[in-house]
Image (cartoon, grey):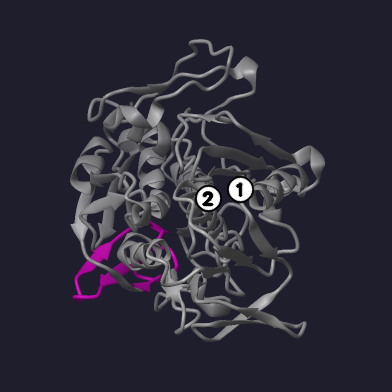
């Protein structure tokens, strides 16, 4: 417990996505009553967006959780609104409707803005585009088209969903025995999902080949019309009937805060905003090049530790952000678990691929605090068998009297990573 005479540090967390919720949960565990947190977001629900790739295929929709419940469990206040500007000297945040919120520590977790990269392609940004992709699948099944290209645009983007869409489309075509289907994947990556390292990339390349997907690697794509994908810098391209593309991601600049290229917030290795004052940032809206939920949660943990130190939390010290990339790849017929120690390079030793969960709970978003917490709200998130020799090793994080304790089970001896404190 904190000193009753101490005034809690006023912490404003802007953004109700992965990074924002991970920050709240981490602060509750690390600092407890030493902080009074407010979550500023226009959203009423947290949607687990990585699962939205299933929705075009009439598979289970992404889970949704009321933010009012999450903030209550964290002992935080939910404030409806959007961060518009910051006065770093007065330490006041202003919302889009001109409401002022005083803070002593600010964590910006607004995410990135998804922009359409190719007007002639079907852009997949998440659940809002599921119907459009579903319509394309129906045209494929009806024989109205047979050549589909899945494209990763140049610049900031997280490529894994395009692999999932391509693999699930190939699996659908195979299961229905659709004749003459040609599926291509175009990306500037030199290796398929090369960010996960050699072993994982080789496994993904094998998956693509087995599914009959032609991979065009090291290609910067242009889509001049809905039937053409041009390659750069090399000449050439492919003719198709339809193109599905990921969006290009740009930052969400906040007036009063520094801005790097394309509006991303520049951060140091503790996720403090460079040039800011008592301001930290986490998630896709930062200048860190990999835009992924698990990475966002690790940035949030680093930011929360730094804020907890400012709040005087005992036994807490700042820790630099050391990214480990974890990804669950949906293949249509199963899942692949991928992991790479980004800070240590992407060589063979850093690259792991498995048929079994490499972390527990086996969430799409591998957040240290968020994954175990969501598993308490939805037991299906912790279902399944982690390894063949699974033990029973609970890991608990105490959110205090305002929330239930939650735990996850797994088998460290089998190589599984426990997501929890």
Q: Give the tally of numbered discs.
A: 2
Is 206 placed above or below 375 here? below
Q: Residue at x 49, y 45 (%)?
A: 332
Q: State the image coordinates of residue 48 (x, y, percent, origin top left).
A: 36, 48
Left or right of 386 on screen, residue 97 = left
Where residue 286 sits in the image (x, y, percent)?
A: 52, 64
At which x and y percent is residue 295?
Answer: 54, 50
Q: Position of residue 1 (x, y in %)?
A: 33, 26
**Is residue 252 among the parts visible in the rendering?**
no
Q: CA distance from mark 1 to mark 2?
A: 6 Å
Q: Which sits in the foreground, 412 or 103?
A: 412
* Magenta stretch in the rendered image: 86-112
In the rendered image, is residue 167 in sight?
A: yes
Residue sitting at 58 percent across and 30 percent down?
358
Mark 2 — residue? 299
Which quadrant would residue 129 be assigned to in this image?
Answer: bottom left
Q: Within the magenta stretch, is there residue 165?
A: no
Residue drawn 47% across the image and 40% down it: 367
Query: Are the residues tagged 1 and 2 within 8 Å (C-beta)?
Result: yes
**Point 46% across, 78% down: residue:** 121
Q: Residue furthest bottom?
A: 224
Q: In terms of secondary structure, where does tag 1 sit?
A: loop
Position of residue 131 relative to residue 52, above or below, is below
Q: Which mark is residue 127?
A: none
In this rendered view, identify the residue nearer to me: 39 or 157: 157
Decide: few, some or many residues near mark 2? Use Cα within 10 Å; few <14, some 14-19, many ≥20. Answer: many
Neighbourhood count class around disc 1 (C-alpha, 10 Å): few under 14, some 14–19, many 20 upward: some
Magenta stretch encompasses residue 97: yes
Which mark, by number, is residue 321? 1
Disc nearer the start of the sequence (1/2):
2
């Amino acid at each position: 417990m904190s000193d009753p005479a101490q005034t809690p540090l006023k912490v404003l967390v802007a953004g109700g996505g992965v990074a924002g919720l991970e920050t709240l949960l981490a602060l509750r565990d690390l600092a407890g009553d030493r902080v009074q947190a407010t979550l500023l977001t226009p959203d009423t629900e947290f949607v687990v967006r990585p699962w939205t790739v299933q929705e075009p295929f009439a598979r289970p929709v992404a889970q949704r959780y009321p933010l009012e419940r999450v903030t209550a469990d964290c002992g935080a206040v939910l404030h409806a609104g959007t961060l518009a500007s910051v006065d770093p000297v007065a330490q006041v945040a202003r919302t889009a409707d001109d409401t002022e919120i005083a803070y002593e520590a600010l964590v910006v977790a607004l995410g990135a803005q998804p922009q359409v990269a190719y007007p002639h392609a079907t852009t997949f940004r998440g659940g809002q585009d599921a119907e459009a992709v579903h319509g394309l699948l129906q045209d494929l099944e009806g024989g109205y088209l047979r050549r589909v290209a899945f494209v990763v645009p140049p610049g900031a983007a997280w490529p894994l969903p395009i692999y999932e869409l391509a693999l699930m489309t190939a699996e659908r075509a195979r299961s229905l025995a659709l004749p003459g289907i040609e599926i291509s994947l175009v990306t500037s990556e030199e290796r398929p999902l090369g960010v996960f390292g050699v072993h994982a990339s080789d496994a993904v390349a094998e998956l693509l080949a087995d599914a009959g997907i032609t991979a065009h690697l090291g290609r910067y794509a242009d889509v001049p019309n809905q039937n053409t994908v041009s390659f750069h810098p090399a000449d050439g391209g492919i003719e198709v009937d339809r193109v599905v593309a990921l969006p290009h991601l740009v930052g969400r600049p906040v007036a009063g805060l520094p801005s790097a290229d394309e509006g991303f917030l520049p951060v140091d290795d503790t996720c403090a905003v460079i040039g800011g004052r008592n301001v930290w940032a986490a998630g896709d809206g930062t200048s860190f090049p990999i835009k992924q939920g698990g990475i966002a949660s690790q940035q949030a943990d680093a930011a929360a530790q730094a804020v907890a130190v400012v709040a005087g939390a005992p036994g807490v010290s700042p820790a630099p952000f050391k990214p480990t990339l974890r990804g669950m790849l949906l293949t249509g017929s199963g899942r692949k678990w991928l992991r790479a120690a980004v800070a240590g390079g992407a060589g063979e030793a850093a690259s792991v691929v498995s048929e079994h969960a490499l972390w527990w709970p086996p969430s799409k978003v591998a957040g240290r605090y968020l994954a175990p917490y969501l598993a308490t709200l939805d037991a299906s998130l912790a279902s399944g068998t982690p390894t063949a020799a699974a033990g029973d090793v609970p890991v608990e994080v105490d959110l205090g009297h305002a929330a239930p304790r939650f735990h996850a089970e797994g088998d460290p001896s089998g190589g599984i990573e426990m997501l929890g404190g």
